[in-house]
Image (spheres, grey):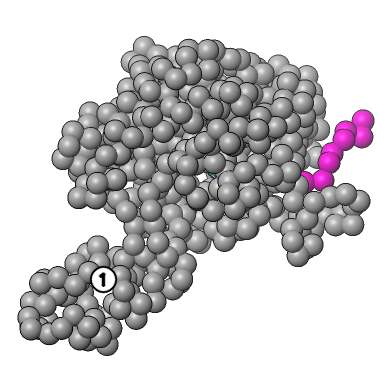
Amino acid sequence: MWRPPERIRWQPDPGEWPDAETATASRLFSPVRVGPVELGSRTWVPAMVPWRATGDGEVTDNVLDWYARFARGQPGAIVVEATGIRDIPSGPLLRIGNDAFLPGLKKLTDTVRRESDGQTKLFIQLIDFLAIRRRPDPATYFERFLEITDRHRDALDARDWPEEKIRHHLATLPDENLDDILDERELESLRQGYRERVTDTDLAHIAELPEILPGLFADAARRAREAGFDGVELHYAHAYTMASFLSALNTRGDGYGGSRENRVRLPLEVYAAVRAAVGDDFVVGTRYLSEDCIEDGNTVEDAAWFGAEFAKAGFDVLSLSRGGKFEDAKQPAVGQAAYPYTGPSGYECMPQYISDEQGPFGRNVEPVARIRAAVRAAGCDTPLVVTGGIHGFEQAEAILRDDKADIIGFARQSLADPDWFRKVRGGHGAAVRVCEYTNYCEALDQKHVPVTCQLWDRENLDEPGIAKTEDGKRRLVAPEWEPTA
Ligand SMILES: Cc1cc2nc3c(=O)[nH]c(=O)nc-3n(C[C@H](O)[C@H](O)[C@H](O)COP(=O)(O)O)c2cc1C
Ligand code: SF4
């Protein structure tokens, strides 16, 4: 992962822990309304893909155990990992693109309800993404993938060469010569791996996204409701389709790109279709970016404007992330796919302990405060969730007290200690396993292998009945915790 050049090493600093009385009286542990439901506290476990579904995207026992473990910590809400809305193979990513997924998802909602004693609301994040291919071996790229055109023939002064000869010749050229022969997209396909964009409107399936996505999201949301979720979170963040529609880099000429009004059009049409499918008594939220954190991408001003539009349209909750884009991703190794959390924007999304003078804690707070002000100025009281490097009670309480956000997202901190909420509320803050923001978990995510935390995955490996990784070296969920007094 990219890290700021300052290389300043930060230690987590959770501050003072409250006693039970202070915690109970705090804003963090006070209820908050999210559209038709009330969360028991202003605590939120944001979506995190733990790579535990089957290769077909089905819920497994390991998926159930994972969410059961979070549920026992009794946060106000849990958002189930990014779940694919299309009925197409997507590797071991959860899927909701067909009614066949309903029985597994029903088990998941039952499990969380039971294990949280009904204290935790459960949402599911709905995602669409475009095609991305692995970085090819250059020989294969020139042999099979590159489409040879007159542009290449002219650049090589090889009008009358047979195609085979051109392919062979290109494969022998040094890298710097290719810069003058291949166009930007071809160079990207060669060096990063082919990646579709929402602006590829010459491809029929990309041109028609505005026609098909509202229906796909709406059907998925209807299934989520049937499966017993309390709501859906439409994934409009990071490197995926809907975030790309919102992005300032979206120059589509069909009324769905260019100005902010055009860029927000499809996200609002998707919202309208989802709302029509699920009704008003089901939470519909979105996760989107407070800033794209890439050159020429969306700024916080764009995000504030979108926030007001989303709130006016009727979204029940706005959860803000930042960065996580393909545009500045590191070059993957041959045979690997680019990963949107490897560049500076990826750092902003999951900031690590080796940082700059701002440090990894709370980098999203001020942008979210700015967006919240715009939402309030538009006359909407929609709650906003802030996430990013938040691990201490005082830090969370100050954000709420200063009206910078309404709900606090703890992603890696709850991975490190799913009992954070129960411990802190009960006055057992000193027992919290504090996240060190090493991003060991994120590296596992990048490899698409089961995500665990280095603070607990080697603990009590001989405990009877626990689930482990296939090699038996890591436990899959955090050890249980019971208060001693
Ligand atoms: C292993 C892992 C998987 C993640 N998967 C998702 C995801 O599916 N959807 C999403 O919106 N964010 C995802 N994120 C980002 C987190 O929700 C969160 O925004 C980020 O980790 C920063 O918050 P934190 O500092 O509290 O961890 C993931 C993060 C991690 C560490
Ligand atoms: S592995 Fe654990 S301690 Fe390290 S960043 Fe992830 S959750 Fe935090």
In this image, 266 relative to 394: left or right? Answer: left
Q: Is residue 16 visible?
A: no
**Where does label 1 land, which residue?**
146
The one nearer the camera, 288 or 375, is 288
Residue lying farthest to the front in this orientation: 100
> Looking at the rendering, which quadrant does residue 459 occupy?
bottom right
Disc 1 residue lies near ligand 1 with CB under 8 A: no
> Looking at the rendering, which quadrant does residue 457 occupy?
bottom right
Q: Residue at x 66, y 36 (%)?
A: 104
Task: Look at the image and give the residue range highlighted in magenta.
Answer: 478-485
Neighbours of disc 1 within 10 Å: few (<14), some (14-19), many (20+): some
The one nearer the camera, 461 or 380, is 461
Q: Residue at x 77, y 26 (%)?
A: 114
Q: Amino acid at mark 1?
A: Leu
Does residue 37 belong to the magenta stretch? no
Q: Residue at x 43, y 31 (%)?
A: 217
Residue 236, given in percent of the width and then of the height, sits at 41, 36
From the image, give the main secondary structure of the stretch colored magenta.
Answer: loop
The one nearer the camera, 160 or 193, is 160
In this image, 101 relative to 131: left or right? Answer: right
Residue 405, given in percent of the width and then of the height, sits at 50, 26
> Looking at the rendering, which quadrant does residue 252 occupy?
top left
Q: Residue at x 63, y 47 (%)?
A: 53
Residue 430, given in percent of the width and then of the height, sits at 79, 38
Q: Reply above or below: 164 against 116.
A: below
Q: Quadrant of the C terminus?
A: top right
Does residue 481 belong to the magenta stretch? yes
Residue 478, given in percent of the width and then of the height, sits at 77, 46
The one nearer the camera, 187 or 31, is 187
**Helix, strand or loop under label 1:** loop
